[in-house]
Image (cartoon, rainbow, N blue to C red):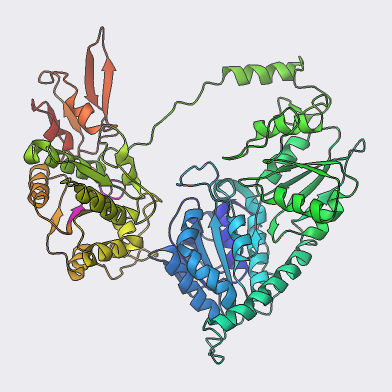
C-alpha cells in the first residue's frame, strides 16, 4: 500500500515498522511532527481503529509495540528517558532539532561509551538555511566527534526504510545511532510504499526488562577506557559494513567515458540526480548516506578518476573524507567542493541550502559547459539535445514563464495580531517610560521563542538572545558589569513558559543563590507556540491531550525563594503597568508572570474598529504597537489613513489604550 506522507510522518511510520516501544522528545522545527504522528496513530488504534480502515478508507499502522510517548521538558531529559528504556531492552526513539542536540550532547556522549541493551535512535533534524533555527549545524560532524553512526536520508521514502536500518544497527552494536533528516526531507511529501515489518529477533517479543549485570550500566574511567577501544573497533566494522549498504552506491558512467566523478550526500543526492537526469552522458556518481565513511566503496569509486566534485549540505564532510582517502592511498585525484574552486573559480555554497538552479550551474561548469542540458517540455518531461539557450517553442515557454513570474513579497517576521507577548512587552516599555520619567537605563535579555520577535521595531524589547534558557543567566552577567561601573541599570530577562521548564529554572536558581539583581519576566501563553502549540508541564495536558498534573510557575518561583512575584494580565493595561512599576524600585530577584493564552488557542472576539471622525491620523497606534491588523493607506501628499483589518484583528483592545483620542472602538471589554 502506498500513502502520501510528509517526511516526518514517514519517519514515524518507519519507526513503528521497526517496533519502536518508547519515544520522547522536545518540539523543535523541523522535527516536531514525528512524535505527533505517533500520537495520532496510537490514539486512533486505542479508540478501535486498529489496522482496519478508518474514516474515508484510511488504514492505520499497528501501534501495538508502543509503551509510552512523551514531550519531555528538554532534549537532555528526553534522551535520558530513552536511555533508561534502552537499558531495559526496549527500542527507543528520541526526536529533536539540531540545536536540541547541544542540550542532549552530555548524556549522548557518555551513552555511547556505556552502551545499550535494546536499541536507541536519535532523530536530529538539521536545518540548512537556517529556516527556523539560530545556527546551521551539521550533525554528521557530531557523529564523527562522538563516534556515533549517522544515517543521512535523501527523501521521505528513504527515511521511512532507513530508520529501520538505524534501529537494526543500534541493536547489533548496542550503541545509539543518529538519523539526520534535513528540513527538505522532514517537510516534503512523497508517495511512500508501506512495507511489512522486517524479520527480527526483536519483533513480537516484549523487552526483557532491566538487568543489573554487576554494575554494567555505571560509567567509570576504567570502563570508559575499555569502551573506547571497542568503539574504535566497532567504527571500523561499521565502515566496512556501510561499503555494501544499499543507500551507499556507485552509478557507473553513461555515454562517453569520463574521468570525472560526482560524490554527494543527503538531500543533495536527489538534486544531483535531477540535474543529471537529462544529460546525454553522465559522470560516475557516488552516493553517501552514512557516517562512518565507507572507505572501501570510495576507493572503488575513485579508481581511474582525475577529478571529483562533492555536493553536500552543510559542511565538507564527504569532501574531507575523500581528500583524506586520496592522501592516505596516494591517489592522484583532485577533490573539488567547498574547499576547492569548481571550474570558473566558484566554490560550492559555503552556507545555506543547495538549490537546483545553483547546482545546474556548478555541475555544468564542472562537467562541460558545452554539453547539452535538459529543457522541460510543456508536459514537464525532460528532452535531450537542446542547449540552455534553445530557441525552440519549449525554450520560449520556459523563458517567458521565468520572466513573467513575479517575485514573492518579503514578509518580515512579526508577532501575530492579538499576541499576548506584544502586550507584555508594551506594558513593560510603558512602565519604564513613566517610571522616574524614563531616566533609568534598561537592558532586555530575551530567549528562544515567538517572543524573540520582540526585538523588531517599534517594540525593540530584546537586546540579547543566545539559546534556550540563556536570557536569565545573561541578564545576571550584564547586571554584574553594569553595577561595577556604578550604573543603576534595570535588567529584564524575558522567557516563555515552555522555555522556563526547558532550561530556565536553573538560571533562576543561579540568580537567587548568587544574590542577583534582575527582573525575570515569564510570558505564559499556556502553550509551546513557536513549534505548533504543543503542551508542556504548565498546560495541564499530556502529549495525548489528556489531563496531566499542571505545574504552577508562580508556585515554582515561590518555592525557589523569590518573594516579589506578580501575576498580571498584559491586556489589562492600566493594572499591569502599575504592577510593573511597583517592582522597579525594588532589588534582588523579582518576577512577573504575564498570563494570557496564545491567540492560536484562544477564541477571538469581535474585532476593533477606527472611528474615522475621531481619528486624527497621528499614527501613534502604528508607531507604538506594530500590530499587523492596523493597516496604513497612503493618501495624496504625505497624508495617511488608518484602518483595522477585521480578518486579522482578534479584538485584544491593546490599541485602545494607545489611542489618545478614543478613536478605536470594539474588541474585548
Q: Can I make out residue 37 in this image?
A: no
Q: Residue at x 67, y 40 (%)?
A: 338
**Against 578, is 299 above or below?**
below
Outermost residue on the bottom side: it is 214
Q: Which residue is most to the top?
A: 637
Q: Position of residue 496 (x, y in %)?
A: 29, 53
For residue 161, which quarter of the picture? bottom right
Tell me where residue 544 appears, x and y as whole percent.
39, 65
Q: Tell me which segment is drawn in magenta.
A: 591-603
In front here: 352 or 165? 352
Asked if residue 303 can be seen in this view, the reply is yes
Q: In percent of the image, x 16 and y 20: which residue is there?
A: 618
Task: Give the vertical position of 110 relative to 666 (above or below).
Answer: below
Comparing 51 with 225, the one in front is 225
Tell me if residue 208 is in the magenta stretch: no
Q: Is residue 65 left or right of residue 607?
A: right
Identity of the residue furthest to the front in this view: 485
Where residue 278 appears, x then y in whole percent? 79, 33
- Residue 527 percent across, percent down from the top left: 31, 55
Residue 666 in the image: above or below residue 509: above
Question: Does residue 68 appear left or right of residue 154 in this picture?
Answer: left
The residue that appears at 86% across and 41% down in the rendered structure is 306
Instruction: Give whichever of 150, 224 is nearer the camera.
Output: 224
Amino acid at each position: 500500500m502506498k500513502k502520501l506522507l510528509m517526511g516526518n510522518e514517514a519517519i514515524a511510520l518507519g519507526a513503528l515498522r521497526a517496533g519502536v516501544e518508547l519515544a520522547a522528545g522536545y518540539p523543535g522545527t523541523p522535527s516536531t511532527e514525528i512524535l505527533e504522528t505517533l500520537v495520532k496513530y496510537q490514539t486512533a488504534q486505542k479508540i478501535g481503529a486498529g489496522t482496519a480502515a478508518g474514516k474515508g478508507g484510511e488504514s492505520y499502522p499497528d501501534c501495538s509495540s508502543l509503551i509510552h510517548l512523551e514531550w519531555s521538558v528538554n532534549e537532555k531529559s528526553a534522551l535520558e528517558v530513552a536511555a533508561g528504556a534502552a537499558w531495559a531492552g526496549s527500542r527507543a526513539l528520541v526526536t529533536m532539532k539540531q540545536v536540541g542536540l547541544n542540550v542532549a550532547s552530555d548524556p549522548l556522549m557518555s551513552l555511547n561509551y556505556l552502551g545499550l541493551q535494546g536499541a536507541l535512535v536519535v532523530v536530529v533534524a538539521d536545518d540548512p538555511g537556517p529556516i527556523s533555527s539560530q545556527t546551521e549545524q551539521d550533525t554528521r560532524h557530531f557523529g564523527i566527534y562522538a563516534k556515533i553512526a549517522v544515517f543521512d536520508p535523501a527523501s521521505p521514502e528513504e527515511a521511512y526504510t532507513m530508520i529501520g536500518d538505524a534501529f537494526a544497527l543500534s541493536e547489533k552494536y548496542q550503541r545509539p545511532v543518529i538519523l539526520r533528516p534535513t528540513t527538505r526531507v522532514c517537510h516534503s511529501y512523497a508517495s511512500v510504499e508501506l512495507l511489512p515489518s522486517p524479520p527480527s529477533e526483536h519483533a513480537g517479543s516484549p523487552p526483557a526488562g532491566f538487568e543489573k549485570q554487576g554494575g554494567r550500566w555505571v560509567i567509570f574511567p576504567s570502563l570508559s577506557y575499555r569502551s573506547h577501544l571497542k568503539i574504535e573497533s566497532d567504527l571500523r566494522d561499521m565502515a566496512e559494513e556501510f561499503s555494501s549498504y544499499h543507500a551507499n552506491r556507485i552509478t557507473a558512467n553513461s555515454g562517453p567515458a569520463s574521468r570525472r566523478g560526482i560524490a554527494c550526500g543527503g538531500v543533495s543526492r536527489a538534486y544531483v540526480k535531477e540535474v543529471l537526469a537529462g544529460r546525454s552522458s553522465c559522470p560516475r556518481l557516488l552516493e553517501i548516506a552514512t557516517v562512518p565513511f565507507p572507505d572501501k566503496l570510495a576507493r572503488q569509486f575513485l579508481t581511474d578518476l582525475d577529478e571529483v566534485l562533492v555536493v553536500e549540505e552543510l559542511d565538507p564532510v564527504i569532501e574531507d573524507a575523500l581528500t583524506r582517502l586520496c592522501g592516505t592511498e596516494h591517489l592522484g585525484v583532485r577533490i573539488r567542493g567547498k574547499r576547492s574552486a569548481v571550474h570558473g573559480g566558484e566554490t560550492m555554497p559555503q552556507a545555506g541550502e543547495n538549490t537546483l538552479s545553483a547546482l545546474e550551474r556548478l555541475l555544468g561548469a564542472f562537467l562541460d559547459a558545452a554539453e547539452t542540458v535538459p529543457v522541460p517540455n510543456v508536459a514537464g518531461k525532460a528532452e535531450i539535445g537542446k542547449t540552455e539557450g534553445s530557441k525552440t517553442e519549449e525554450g520560449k515557454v520556459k523563458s517567458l514563464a521565468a520572466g513573467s513570474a513575479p517575485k514573492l513579497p518579503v514578509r518580515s517576521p512579526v508577532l501575530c495580531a492579538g499576541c499576548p507577548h506584544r502586550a507584555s512587552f508594551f506594558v513593560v516599555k510603558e512602565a519604564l517610560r513613566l517610571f522616574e520619567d524614563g531616566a533609568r537605563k534598561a537592558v532586555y535579555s530575551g530567549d528562544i521563542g515567538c517572543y524573540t520577535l520582540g526585538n523588531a521595531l517599534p517594540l525593540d524589547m530584546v537586546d540579547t538572545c543566545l539559546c534556550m534558557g540563556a536570557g536569565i543567566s545573561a541578564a545576571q552577567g550584564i547586571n554584574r558589569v553594569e553595577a561595577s561601573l556604578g550604573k543603576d541599570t534595570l535588567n529584564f530577562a524575558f522567557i516563555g513558559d515552555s522555555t522556563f521548564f526547558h532550561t530556565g529554572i536553573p538560571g533562576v536558581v543561579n540568580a537567587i543563590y548568587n544574590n542577583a539583581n534582575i527582573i525575570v519576566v515569564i510570558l505564559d501563553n499556556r502553550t509551546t507556540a513557536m513549534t505548533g502549540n504543543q503542551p508542556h508541564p504548565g498546560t495541564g495536558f499530556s502529549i495525548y491531550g489528556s489531563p496531566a498534573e499542571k505545574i504552577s510557575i508562580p508556585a515554582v518561583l515561590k518555592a525557589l525563594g523569590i518573594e516579589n512575584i506578580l501575576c498580571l494580565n498584559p491586556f489589562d493595561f492600566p493594572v499591569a503597568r502599575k504592577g510593573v512599576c511597583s517592582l522597579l524600585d525594588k532589588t534582588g530577584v523579582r518576577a512577573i508572570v504575564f498570563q494570557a493564552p496564545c491567540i492560536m488557542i484562544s477564541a477571538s472576539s469581535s474585532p476593533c474598529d477606527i472611528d474615522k471622525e475621531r481619528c486624527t491620523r497621528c499614527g501613534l497606534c502604528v508607531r507604538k504597537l506594530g500590530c499587523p491588523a492596523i493597516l496604513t493607506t497612503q493618501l495624496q501628499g504625505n497624508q495617511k489613513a488608518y484602518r483595522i483589518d477585521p480578518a486579522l484583528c482578534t479584538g485584544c483592545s491593546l490599541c485602545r489604550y494607545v489611542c489618545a483620542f478614543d478613536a478605536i472602538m470594539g474588541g474585548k471589554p
